Image: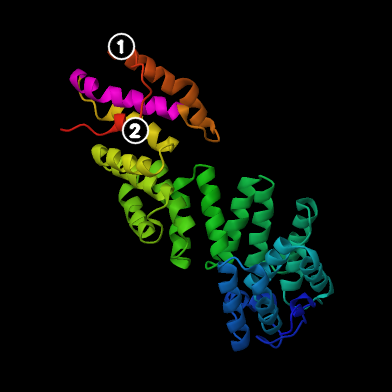
Amino acid sequence: MRPGAWLLPLLPLAGCVSGPPPAAAVEPEHYRTARDPEGAAAWQRAQQALARGDRAAALPDLRIALERCPDLAPAHVAYQDAAQALGGEVLAAMREHYRSLPDRASPVPAWCRARLVPTPYAREPALRAVLARHPSFAWAHWSLGRSHRSEGRVLLAIDAFQAACARDPRLAAARYERALLLTEVGRYEEAALDFDAYLALEPHDDDARLAYTQLAIYRLGRIDRAVRLLDELERTRGGDVAVRLDRAAATWLGGDPRGAVARYLGVLADRPGEARALLNLGLLYYEVLPKSTADRAIHWPRARAAFQLFLQTVVPPDGHDQFERTLAVPFRLGVIAEALGPAPGTAPTLADLRLPEGP
């Protein structure tokens, strides 16, 4: 293919199918499976290029995939998203292609044009028009959910993603986005079911696995499930600080606070200013490890050092962080000072956080 050929409009050729049956008779696999061998090979190459972040390299193969498989919905999404990210002539060529794409029995041309409508106010009626003619087309339900989500209409988005999943249980993106929104609104048990279903479809998505891990630890208290997820994450992203922090939290909530202290100290050895590790170390030394007044004399100096170091960190605040910095941590430091006396005049260091010997 000559350089720049991917700037030409796509030709509305039919390679996968010679003309789709009426929408009600079309199985979901029709829209997500490349049946033409040349189209399937091009789609695979395009996905590999996109996975390594090379959108420009993916474009020629996306052209081939869509010429050979004009109803391949995920390839249309990839082409539109890549062109919008690249902008310029690529974006103009993509928009011209969809403007000139003729309507046919398939919902795909109208859905593709609806996805490109710039505002939700106009996009949502366009998507509803597609669904009025093709109510079983899961990809339009998914796009409607994404439009609702972009406007903050979370419950409507959840319903639209559920409609997409009902029409096509293997539409993984709808399952994942529904899981995230269910977590956001506190419907944690339902979110877990969607995460399980999504990871069965996309077992290599570590971002989703991490989100599910955090749901399992901090919202559901399913430590056994979280540990299994962390075992999988550590095989691919064991050095990530988020994975290490979640492993420490799972160790704590799994009944091993001293093991959790050791894990947080390991994180701080590599990232001395990690606020979450410092705060949780302070909490472990302040309220978990001490079982008596004598224990407080051992652990509270370490809690004080951890809390002081936490207050020195600079991170983008959220509601919980702000509460800890302005109220909770200063209150605990006051309790420690009342019990042990004023803090030493020297600034605390990570050495002051080391785990003491003994139980």
Residue 331 appears in the picture as rendered: yes
Sequence order check: which comes first, mark 2 or mark 1? 1
Tag 2: Cα neighbours inside 10 Å, few (<14), some, or many (≥20)? some
Q: Nearer the viewer, residue 299 or 292?
A: 299
Q: CA distance from mark 2 to mark 1?
A: 21 Å
Q: Is residue 329 above or below residue 94?
A: above
1 part of magenta stretch: no
- Residue at position x 60%, y 53% in the image: 159
Give the quarter of the image for residue 20. bottom right
Amino acid type, label 2: Leu
Q: Report which quarter residue 196 is drawn in.
A: bottom left
Q: Which residue is mark 1?
A: 341
The segment highlighted magenta reads 293-311
Task: Tell me if label 2 and label 1 are in contact, CB under 8 Å.
Answer: no
Residue drawn at 25 percent across, 41 percent down: 259
Residue at 23% of width from left, 20% of height from top? 297
Residue 311's mark? none
Q: For this view, does 215 lie left or right of residue 81?
A: left
- Quarter holding the C terminus is top left
Q: Nearer the viewer, mark 2 or mark 1?
A: 2
Crowding at dot 1, Cα within 10 Å, few <14 / some 14-19 / many 20+, comes out as few
User: Which element is circle 2 on?
Assistant: helix
* Front position in the image: 18 or 34: 34
- In the picture of the structure, the residue carrying the numbered disc 2 is 350
Q: Is 47 above or below relative to 314?
A: below
Tell me the kind of residue under disc 1.
Gly
Is residue 194 among the parts visible in the rendering?
Answer: no
